[in-house]
Each structure stands twice: as structure tokens, then as C-alpha cells.
């Protein structure tokens, strides 16, 4: 408050108190602004922040777990600066590490045109200073000939969002009025990527370490570990990403990021994000039904409205109110 | 190239004209101050108004004059939003009281709205209620947001002399009130 002069001082002293914005409030406002700016790449979601190509549904994820964003802020540096850390953590590097990484990456990006990648993802986020949160995603992504994804988001057993995203469009289904709202050439169009993107980014990092003699839930597994230390914006963070892959099929089983942030050298926040993948498979041939990636096919009685960005954002916020 | 933490607000806003996410730097730098100013004046509704300030600022970024510090500009936008908010709330309240009113002319425009008066409390309302809306805004930008006269001029897009006269008048009112209370 300004206190120059008796009158100003008198007024300043009688102004109502206002606390500094808490982290959740700040995260909410920042996310709303970033959505307004139309760049999900600036989102603070833990894993997805690590990739430059942000899938539409990942934004929904973060909006659904808004409490995550601040703790995840520790990872912003990772997002912005890429890999600047050192290798370490995990198990011993093996001679075939590079080839294992390449093979896993090939599985994550099936080359068969028209095939559909089906993934169920169960996420758990826990934080040092926010309530934990969970979500479920069911994702179908058709590759080749124009990538398109459909995502059904569940939270506490209820479908909370249904979206479809293509290279130059975006749709969201509102069950209240049985309408599919569509925007063509949406701002998010250039950011489409699959659910595999964060894991790919981990694999592509030369500092990730492969241990092909690990165990996961008592069974043999391949463990891929990446440790990163980042300093940016006056803060620093230390994170470890561990992904377990099933031997043989080489599909991901689980990916966990644990991070600690520091401010002025002192521990600040910590968070853990775990993504389980109970289903990860590639559908080909007759199993790769186009309807799997189509909102209109899933909701044949729904009407479709092509709207402008502002209207779409409004509907989107209604569908994802925490955003 | 994204602005760095040591780039000026002017540079960041300029960069955001072709790279919208660059505008996030502005939010990170000024959010606490804008939030506090809006919440002091509007209570819990201030949170939304503060958030809207940045969205509005982004939409208006092409008009930014390139100054190093965007705080006065942002506080000016926030002030306009607050004024709109109070005005809307007052109109809605009066409309409810008199649903048959045909005119949309607001005879109380500029007066201290009830919602703002409630927020400020009886003493401040007594002093500030006698001021025009722009005088009140100038005073609160000075007393609450800690802007200098020159910065208030930027925020309100008026000459510095106008700011001086507005705050002078506000101080006179406050002084008269204090004298009536024999405080000074």
C-alpha cells in the first residue's frame, strides 16, 4: 500500500486485506490464459510438458487434475529446456540399450497405415502440497493418412470428456445437448501426437538408461530410466522418469515421474505422476474400425455444430470445468 | 525466440505478437499484483477479474506502447474491468428492484455501487463514495496498487496533470473526513 501523506495512509490502512494468490488459483488462471493463447505446449503437465507436440487430450488431463499443475511446475524447466541433465539412477546400461530403445520406439509408432493404436491409461498424481488425483483415459489413435485420435476421459467412474482431434480439426461432444462441437483448423491442430509421445521423448534422450533384467510386479521387465536436473526461471528441479516395458511385446506397462523442485536451494515441492497402461495394443485390418476414432460414429444421433474458436473454448471449458 | 526472464515486458509482449505463448512471461511476472489489486477491490470476484485482465491484455497486446514495465498497463485494464463489473452489478441490482423501468440510462453511473461499498466498508465508502469513479480509480491505483502519478497516467490513459487533480480531490475529501473525525 502507498502510505505517502496522512490521507493516503488512512485510506491504505482501511483497504480490505487480500491474500497473495495461492498456487491453485494461480494455476487455474494461468491455464485459462494459456488456453486463451491456444498453446497447449506451455501446459505444465508433468510428462507431456516434456514434449513439444502436445496432444489435445493431454490438456484435458491436466485440466482435470488442476491441482497437479503447480507441483508440476517443477517440471516446467524440463519442458522449456529439454535435456540438460546427467544420466544416472536406474540399473546398469547394457550393450544392447540402443537397439532396445529403437525396438520400443518402433512398437510405439506402428508403421502400418490405417492401423489403430488402442491404449488405456490410468494416471495417479500425488503432490507434497495438493490432494492426489486420478483419471482414466481410453484412447484410439489412427495412424497414417491423417492422424486422428478419440479420447474418452473418466474420473471417479464417470465419463467427463469425449474429444476427437485431427490434424486440422478438433471436436468435443456435449452429452447434455447431444451435440458435437467442431472447430476446423483449430489452434491445437499442429500439436497432435499420440499417447506415446512422453515415452518416446524419454527413449530419444541419450541419457536414458536401459536395464533389461529388471522386474515389474514380480515379472521380468525392461526398465528405462532418465534422470534430469534443470535450472530455469530462478528455480531448479530434479526429476526421474522410469518406464517399464514388457519383454517380447515391448509395450509400455507403466511410466512414473518423480520430481522435486528447489527454490533458492531449499526443497520446495515434490510430486509423482504414475501412468499405468493396462491396455496397449495395435489394431490392424478389420479390427481397425474407423468408427473407433470418430465421435460422430460413436454418437450417430448427435448433431454437429461448426463453431468459432471462442465458442469452442466456452464449450470446452464447460466440458472441462476445472480448466 | 521466447523471451527470457530478463527481457523487458515490452519485448515479451512484442514477441507474443507472433509467438502467443511468449505472453506467459507477463502473467508470471504480474499475476500476484494484479490478483491482489482486483481482490482488494472486488473480493472473491476479483480472482476472475484478474484472470480476465490477462486475457484482455493479450487480446490488446498490439496496442501496447512498448514500455519496459507492463504493470501500469495491466492495472489500467484491471481497473476498467472492475468498473465494468461494479456497473453491471449495480444495474442488475436496480433492475431487480424496478423491473418495470423502461430506461437503460443509469442515473447512478459513477457512484459507489453497493457491492463496492460493502467491500470497502462504511468508513472508506463514506470518503470514496463522494468521488467520481475515475477519481476513485486514480486514488486506489495510488493507495492500493502503489502506482506513481506517472504510472497512473499510463494506466488510465490520461495526462499526468489529470491524475494529480483527481488524486488531489480525493485527498481533500479524505482530509475533510478525517478532520470531521478529529483524527488530524
Image: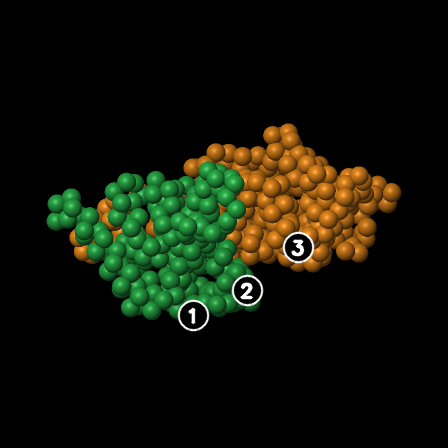
Residue that numbered label 3 is attached to? A308
**Which color scheme did the rendering employ for the protein?**
by chain
Q: Is residue B19 left or right of residue B106?
A: right
**Chain letter of the residue beneath label 3 in the structure image:** A
**Chain letter of the residue beneath label 2 in the structure image:** B
Bin the neighbour count of mark 3 within 10 Å (Cα to Cα): few under 14, some 14-19, many 20 and up: few
**Chain letter of the residue beneath label 1 in the structure image:** B
Q: SS at mark 3?
A: loop
Residue at 66 percent of width and 41 percent of height: A252
Q: Tell me the number on the disc at residue B66.
A: 1
Q: Which of marks 3 and 2 is in front?
A: 3
The chain that appears green in the image is B
The answer to whether marks 1 and 3 sit on the same chain is no
Residue at 72 percent of width and 42 percent of height: A179
Q: In this view, does A97 lie to the left or right of A127?
A: right
Towards the viewer: A157 or A171: A171
Bin the neighbour count of mark 1 within 10 Å (Cα to Cα): few under 14, some 14-19, many 20 and up: some
Amino acid at each position: 500500500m502507498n502510505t505517502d501523506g496522512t490521507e493516503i495512509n488512512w485510506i491504505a490502512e482501511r483497504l480490505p486485506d487480500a491474500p497473495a494468490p495461492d498456487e491453485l488459483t494461480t494455476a487455474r488462471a494461468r491455464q485459462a490464459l494459456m488456453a486463451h493463447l491456444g498453446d497447449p505446449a506451455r501446459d505444465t503437465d508433468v510428462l507431456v510438458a516434456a514434449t513439444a507436440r502436445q496432444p489435445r487430450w493431454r490438456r484435458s488431463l491436466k485440466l482435470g487434475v488442476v491441482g497437479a499443475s503447480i507441483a508440476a511446475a517443477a517440471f516446467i524447466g524440463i519442458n522449456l529446456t529439454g535435456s540438460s541433465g546427467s544420466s544416472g539412477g536406474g540399473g546398469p546400461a547394457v550393450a544392447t540399450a540402443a537397439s532396445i530403445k529403437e525396438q520400443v520406439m518402433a512398437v510405439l509408432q506402428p508403421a502400418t497405415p490405417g492401423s489403430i493404436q488402442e491404449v488405456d491409461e490410468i494416471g495417479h498424481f500425488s503432490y507434497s502440497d495438493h490432494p492426489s488425483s486420478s483419471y482414466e483415459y481410453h484412447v484410439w489413435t489412427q495412424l497414417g493418412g491423417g492422424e486422428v485420435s478419440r479420447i474418452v476421459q473418466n474420473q471417479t467412474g464417470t465419463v467427463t470428456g469425449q474429444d476427437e482431434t485431427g490434424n486440422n480439426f478438433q471436436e468435443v461432444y456435449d452429452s447434455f445437448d447431444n451435440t458435437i462441437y467442431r472447430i476446423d483448423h483449430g489452434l491445437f491442430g499442429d500439436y497432435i501426437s499420440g499417447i506415446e509421445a512422453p515415452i518416446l521423448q524419454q527413449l530419444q534422450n541419450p541419457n536414458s538408461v536401459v536395464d533389461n533384467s529388471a522386474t515389474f510386479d514380480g515379472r521380468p521387465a525392461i526398465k528405462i530410466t532418465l534422470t534430469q536436473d534443470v535450472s530455469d526461471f530462478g528455480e531448479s528441479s530434479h526429476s526421474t522418469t522410469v518406464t517399464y516395458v514388457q519383454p517380447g511385446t515391448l509395450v509400455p506397462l507403466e511410466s512414473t515421474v518423480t520430481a522435486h523442485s528447489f527454490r533458492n536451494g531449499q526443497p520446495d515441492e515434490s510430486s509423482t505422476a504414475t501412468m499405468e497402461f493396462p491396455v496397449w495394443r495395435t489394431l490392424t485390418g478389420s479390427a481397425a474400425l474407423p468408427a473407433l476414432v470418430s465421435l460422430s460414429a460413436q454418437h450417430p444421433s448427435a448433431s454437429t455444430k461448426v463453431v468459432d474458436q471462442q465458442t469452442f473454448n466456452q464449450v470446452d471449458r464447460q466440458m472441462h470445468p476445472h480448466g | 525466440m521466447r523471451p527470457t526472464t530478463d527481457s523487458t515486458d515490452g519485448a515479451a509482449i512484442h514477441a507474443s505478437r507472433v509467438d502467443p505463448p511468449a505472453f506467459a512471461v507477463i502473467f508470471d511476472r504480474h499475476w500476484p499484483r494484479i490478483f491482489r489489486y482486483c481482490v482488494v477491490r472486488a473480493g472473491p470476484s476479483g480472482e476472475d477479474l484478474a484472470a480476465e485482465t490477462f486475457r484482455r491484455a493479450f487480446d490488446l497486446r498490439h496496442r501496447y506502447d512498448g514500455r519496459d514495465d507492463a504493470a501500469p498497463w495491466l492495472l489500467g485494464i484491471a481497473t476498467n474491468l472492475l468498473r465494468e463489473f461494479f456497473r453491471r452489478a449495480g444495474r442488475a441490482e436496480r433492475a431487480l428492484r424496478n423491473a418495470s423501468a423502461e430506461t437503460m440510462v443509469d442515473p447512478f453511473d459513477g457512484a459507489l455501487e453497493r457491492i463496492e461499498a460493502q467491500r470497502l466498508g462504511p468508513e472508506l465508502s463514506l470518503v470514496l463514495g463522494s468521488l467520481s469513479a475515475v477519481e476513485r480509480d486514480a486514488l486506489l491505483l495510488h493507495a492500493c496498487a502503489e502506482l506513481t502519478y506517472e504510472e497512473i497516467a499510463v494506466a488510465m490513459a490520461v495526462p499526468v496533470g489529470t491524475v494529480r487533480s483527481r488524486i488531489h480531490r480525493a485527498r481533500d475529501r479524505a482530509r475533510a473526513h478525517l478532520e470531521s473525525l478529529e483524527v488530524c
